[in-house]
Image: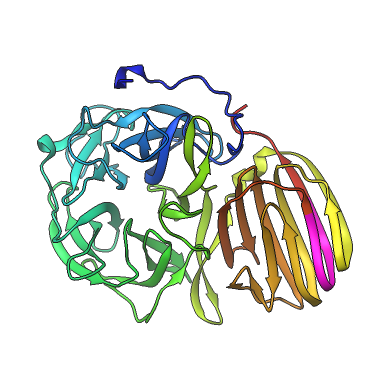
Amino acid sequence: MTPDDFPYPDTNYQEDNRGQFHFSTRAGWMNDVNAPLYYRGVYHLYYQHNPFSLVWDTMHWGHATSPDLVHWTQRPIALDPHVHPGDLWSGGGVVDTANSSGLKGGDDDPIIVYSGTNGVTVFYSLDGGATFTTYADGKKVVTPGGTSRDPKVFWDPVSKQWGMVVWSDEGGNGVDFSTSANLLDWTFASRYRADWLFECPNLIRMPIDGGYRWLLHSGSGEYQVGDWDGTAFRTDWTGPQKINQTATHAGSGYYAALNFENLPNDRVVSMAWQGENKGSIWTGNASFPVDLALQHTADGLRVFSTPIPELATLRESTQSWENLTVEDGVQQIPAGSTYELEATIDVSRATRFTLKVGREVTYQDQRLDGAELLPVNGKIKLHLLVDRDQLDVFGNEGAVYQSYNVPPAELELVAEGRAVVEQLTIHQLKSIWR
């Protein structure tokens, strides 16, 4: 196979295990989400990709587009090592709507992406993100000390300059920050070191209380909230929290999330890599997009994650139940293998409550599969997305967020003690591929 063999082989996306509303590459290997962005009504998703194999090797940047963050169409390879120099590993991208770079050469705004190991290389598109040209013959525009990779660029409207965050292991895990007026010439600004801060860093400006705070997170989804003063990130937090409360690591059910750049109205939408799913012609998928928001809790500011409301466009039939009592027993519910579940459960008289959906999603001792989830008036809310081998779990409207790759199974409600499912709604979901 050569680059000229693209587009990809035909598929109806109905292979065993393949998600019906989680994006997966048409064929080949997929890992980290790269440079998600929004441009003139189209969402662009780039990703780490090996089109020649079902295992990691010789990274390309795959590309898909969507009009609504739900329905995706595979596009030709965006960055190809036969054409674009360097290690085309993870990175971010921006839409240069003000032509800060001076690269604009037609109707489209420049779309500029950043990649590379042990030094950052720039690529730019003048056709709306379909094809990319290497800037300055691939010269490194930023080179941190030690081993480095995964550049991510962001805009700071206060200092009116661009910022870049890059992971490196110089002196231990941490990130280098650089700043630029034109997206091409960069000046070192500061370093932030933390043991937890490993790979795929991201700095996001988040609205809260009529103002903004800054969220710094790593590939594992560990994060701190603080402030960006134009050159440095500062926080008084002593340790990180987690966006996704699972065992997050490369190849797990959640890793390497990035937010879509250039979204209107301060919206923050994030997607991650789910690495445990595979089938006959593909490996890996993306998590279903979530809206991220900062909220006040008794423990301070925390990130809440909720599935994007555009999911509702896939609902094709709905069943609801009220006041189902499960007492020291099991209640089976017909559900299928591709659905959305919403439930409010009174757990005040239950010592343990479980939803069996291919894995056991268990609430016990005020914890949902190990993550704290405090009841409100004795009740909890659960929101599950079940998509064949993909499972996303949300508790209390985003206070808990967990993602897995698991085999599907019949839905069962199991209680020790007495649990009252006050409301249970199941929406059957259409395939995004049909």
- Residue found at x 15% / y 61%: 146
- Residue found at x 60% / y 54%: 392
Quadrant of image for the N terminus: top left
- Residue found at x 59% / y 39%: 19
Q: Relative to 256, say whether 12 is above or below.
A: above
- Residue closest to the eye, 93 or 14: 14
Which x, y percent locates residue 21? 60, 39
Quadrant of image for the C terminus: top right
The colour scheme applied to this rendered structure is rainbow
Quarter residue 64 falls in: top left
User: Left or right: 118 with respect to 174?
Assistant: left
Is residue 232 in view from this perspective? Answer: no
User: Left or right: 368 with respect to 89?
Assistant: right
Quarter residue 18 falls in: top right
Is residue 413 in view from this perspective? Answer: yes
- Residue found at x 24% / y 27%: 106
- Residue closest to the eye, 375 or 17: 17
Which x, y percent locates residue 278? 52, 39
Which x, y percent locates residue 226? 36, 73
Secondary structure mainly formed by the magenta segment? strand
- Range covered by the magenta-colored residues: 412-425
Which x, y percent locates residue 103? 18, 36
